[in-house]
Image (cartoon, rainbow, N blue to C red):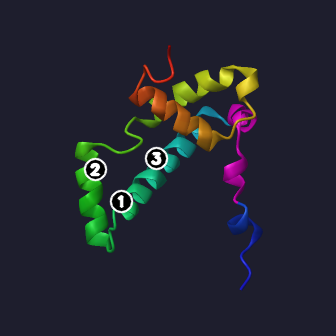
C-alpha cells in the first residue's frame, strides 16, 4: 500500500510564521495544545512505554517531574508571536520556532554573550 501524500509529506511540517500570523488566536491555542499533547505522548513512547496503563502512569509521572516542553500553550503562544514579529524569521518552520522558543525559556542565558 502506498501512503497518502498527507502521510508522506505532512503539511504541518511546512507551517511557518506567515501561516502562524493568519491563524486566529483560538486556532493558535488549539495548535499549541495539540503540539504539547503530541510532544508529551512522544516523550512517553520514547521512554519505552508499551501499553495504555504504562502510558498513563508515565504521563502522570512526567507531569510532576517535567516534560521537554513544560510550559503552557499561552506561554508558547506569546513567545512564538514575539519570535515571528521579526519579518526575517517568518519563513522559519513553526516546529523549529517552538524548539527554539523552548530552549530559550528553559535556559534564558543560552546563546547570549
Q: Tell me residue 12's x, y (percent).
A: 67, 51
- Of all residues, the one furthest to the front in this rendering is 113
- The reply to whether the C-beta atoms of the residues labelled 3 and 1 are less than 8 Å apart is no
Q: Main secondary structure of the magenta part?
A: helix
Task: Tell me what residue is drawn at x 53 percent, y 25 percent.
Answer: 78
Left-right relation of 51 to 90: left
Q: Tell me residue 20's x, y (percent).
A: 68, 35
Which region shows up in magenta? 10-22
Q: CA distance from mark 3 to mark 1?
A: 12 Å
Q: CA distance from mark 3 to mark 2?
A: 13 Å
Mark closer to the chain start, 2 or 1:
1
Q: Quadrant of residue 81?
A: top right
Q: Establish if 60 lies above or below 106.
A: below
Judge whether residue 92 can be spotted in this image: yes
Task: Tell me what residue is drawn at x 24 percent, y 44 percent.
Answer: 65
- Of all residues, the one furthest to the bottom in this rendering is 1
Residue 44 badge? 1
Mark closer to the chain start, 3 or 2:
3
Judge whether residue 74 can be spotted in this image: no
Q: Tell me residue 4's x, y (percent).
A: 74, 73
Q: Tell me residue 18's x, y (percent).
A: 75, 34
Mark closer to the chain start, 3 or 1:
3
- The reply to whether the C-beta atoms of the residues labelled 2 and 1 are less than 8 Å apart is yes
- Looking at the picture, tell me which residue is in the foreground, 6 or 27: 6
Q: Establish if 50 lies above or below 64.
A: below
Q: Establish if 110 lies above or below 13.
A: above
Q: Nearer the viewer, mark 3 or mark 2?
A: 2
Left-right relation of 64 to 95: left
The residue that disc 3 covers is 36
Left-right relation of 108 to 95: left
Q: Secondary structure at mark 3?
A: helix
Amino acid at each position: 500500500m502506498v501512503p497518502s501524500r498527507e502521510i508522506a509529506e505532512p503539511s504541518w511540517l511546512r507551517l511557518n510564521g506567515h501561516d502562524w500570523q493568519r491563524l486566529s488566536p483560538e486556532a493558535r491555542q488549539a495548535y499549541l495544545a495539540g503540539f504539547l499533547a503530541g510532544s508529551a505522548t512522544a516523550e512517553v513512547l520514547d521512554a519505552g512505554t508499551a501499553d495504555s496503563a504504562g502510558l498513563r502512569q508515565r504521563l502522570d509521572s512526567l507531569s510532576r517531574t517535567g516534560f521537554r516542553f513544560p510550559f503552557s500553550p499561552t506561554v508558547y503562544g506569546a513567545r512564538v508571536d514575539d519570535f515571528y514579529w521579526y519579518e526575517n524569521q517568518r519563513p522559519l518552520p513553526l516546529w523549529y520556532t517552538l524548539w527554539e522558543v523552548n530552549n530559550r525559556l528553559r535556559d534564558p542565558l543560552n546563546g547570549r554573550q
